[in-house]
Amino acid sequence: MSAPDRSPDLHDLGVAELAARLAAREVSSVEVTRHFLARIQQHEGLGAFLATNPDVSLAQARAADTRLAAGERTPLLGVPLAHKDVFVTRDFPTTAGSKMLAGYRSPFDATVVSRLGVAPGGAGMVTLGKLNCDEFAMGSGNDNSAYQPVHNPWDTTRVPGGSSGGSAAAVAARLVPAATGTDTGGSIRQPASLTGITGIKPTYGRCSRYGMVAFASSLDQAGPMARSALDCALLLSAMAGPDPDRDSTSLDLPVTNYAAELAAIGSQETRSMPLKGLRIGLPTQFFGAGCSADVLKAVRAALAEFEKLGATLVDVSLPLTELSIPVYYVIAPAEASSNLSRFDGVRYGHRAASYSDLTDMYKKSRSEGFGDEVTRRIMIGTYVLSHGYYDAYYLKAQKIRRLIAQDFQKAFTQCDVIAGPVSPTVAWKIGEKGDDPVANYLADIYTLSSSLAGLPGMSIPAGLGAHGMPVGLQLIGNYFQETQLLGAAHHFQLATDWHQMKPEDKAGLPA
Ligand code: GLN
């Protein structure tokens, strides 16, 4: 099948660089696609992919090449990517990392998938396959996938973070130049941090949720994961935008050309101080004893770089940070218990082979189809919504959620963006947290509050911590301020090269 591979270094190129080579016709989309497919196969052991289909990917690449040959020049045309397996796809199976959906094939593409893809009206990106994730996006280590755990390419004995761990590992290992992820309580930012890549969760509603397997609908948001802020900006412009007929919570705001806006930021200022005037708020609660010293050291060093670029650091307070864990772990399971009731063995998903009556069929199908963590959350969610407990748990959590959002607005009177760690530690060993669900929940301490508030947040590589593992810096913006976040990150990445680090530089990327 394959012509000789003329470009063994193609996988080191980012989205913008690949797009430029494709547009200059130095390489074809078919060549690029073949190169990445071979690399995916070579590194199958990472467990990042749940499905590939070379015939489908190559057909998409040929379609992109035809458009390129006809002179079309759109920013992502012919560049490959892969999707987290919670986005439904017509051409690939969709499992959401669950046995419940084994073998499921959607009759349609998610809005995000069709906006990025080669179908008419799409950005023309080629889909290389579907990426492993925690079951129904519930998890912080990607060890909750019903299929296989994902390994961190920096150290395969460690987790890549979750729930978009397959997306993060694939981008970090350069099996794909970019991937989609979803973030309900940190699942784009935390795996990006733990694998040394860049990811942004936009403002809630920025990307359509149509065709995203629902976990907690008031929190779920799609976003891009790539190696640089510029690449994330290119993808986000294509993914985002209103989808009024299909997702009533999608924001009715025009799509911005984020990449073009990045170039403009700081142009009135001196070249060396592009972030002059940017006030970065540091919440005291994000810099306390709960965060390990190696992570804080890398985060502070990155913040010193921001100061060199002209930003000023100010102290702010988010007093309810600790409560974000119990609040999130009431609200998210509550919504999940409702969303997941559709998996009943009739309308979707797994059905038990033998049962005595209808109730038995529901019970057996759901017990067999859902893993332990999903089952736990359905039970918690059902409990907190039940008569007699609703006021005490669900309603109380909603009230505190509102207060958490208000605290952010207070902080934003003193600063433009908020910064801190993404995760209190570097990536931990697979299995290290044992069967203790709360140990995983605690790892979400710095990402949950902005999710509850619906604010945009991103993770950018900020250095290395313990065991030579990557550390991410989190930037949280006010509503709709994606350009500000991406711009700050972009200028940091122009001045530093943490985002260029590769797992090979550390230990050698194992197959
Ligand atoms: N770790 C969090 C959870 O398990 C967040 C997951 C997510 O953002 N999808 O719910």
Image (cartoon, grey):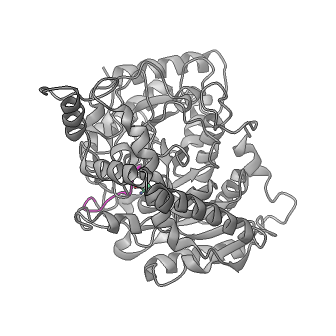
Q: Main secondary structure of the magenta part?
A: loop
Q: With respect to residue 407, does 267 lie above or below?
A: above
Please state the extent of the stretch shown in magenta in the rendering: 156-163
Can residue 265 be seen?
A: yes
Q: Nearer the viewer, residue 28 or 251?
A: 251
Q: Residue at x 54, y 57 (%)?
A: 395
Q: With respect to residue 179, does 509 lie above or below?
A: below
Q: Residue at x 22, y 33 (%)?
A: 365
Does residue 506 show up magenta in the picture? Answer: no
Picture coordinates of residue 57 (x, y %)?
41, 24
Can residue 84 be seen?
A: no
Q: Residue at x 61, y 76 (%)?
A: 319
Residue 493 placement, left or right of 444: right
Query: Which quadrant would residue 122 be assigned to in this image?
Result: top right
Does residue 157 show up magenta in the picture? Answer: yes
The residue lying furthest to the front in this view is 388
Picture coordinates of residue 275 (x, y %)?
76, 66
Quadrant location, ligand no. 1: bottom left
Picture coordinates of residue 114 (x, y %)?
54, 25
Q: With respect to residue 488, does 246 lie above or below?
A: above
Question: Could you tell me how many numbered marks the image carries?
Answer: 0
Residue 101 placement, left or right of 250: left
Residue 235 placement, left or right of 253: left
Picture coordinates of residue 126 (x, y %)?
48, 28
Q: With respect to residue 120, does 314 lie above or below?
A: below
Query: Which quadrant would residue 143 be assigned to in this image?
Result: bottom left
Q: Nearer the viewer, residue 484 or 310?
A: 484
Q: Nearer the viewer, residue 449 or 9?
A: 449
Q: Residue at x 55, y 32 (%)?
A: 112
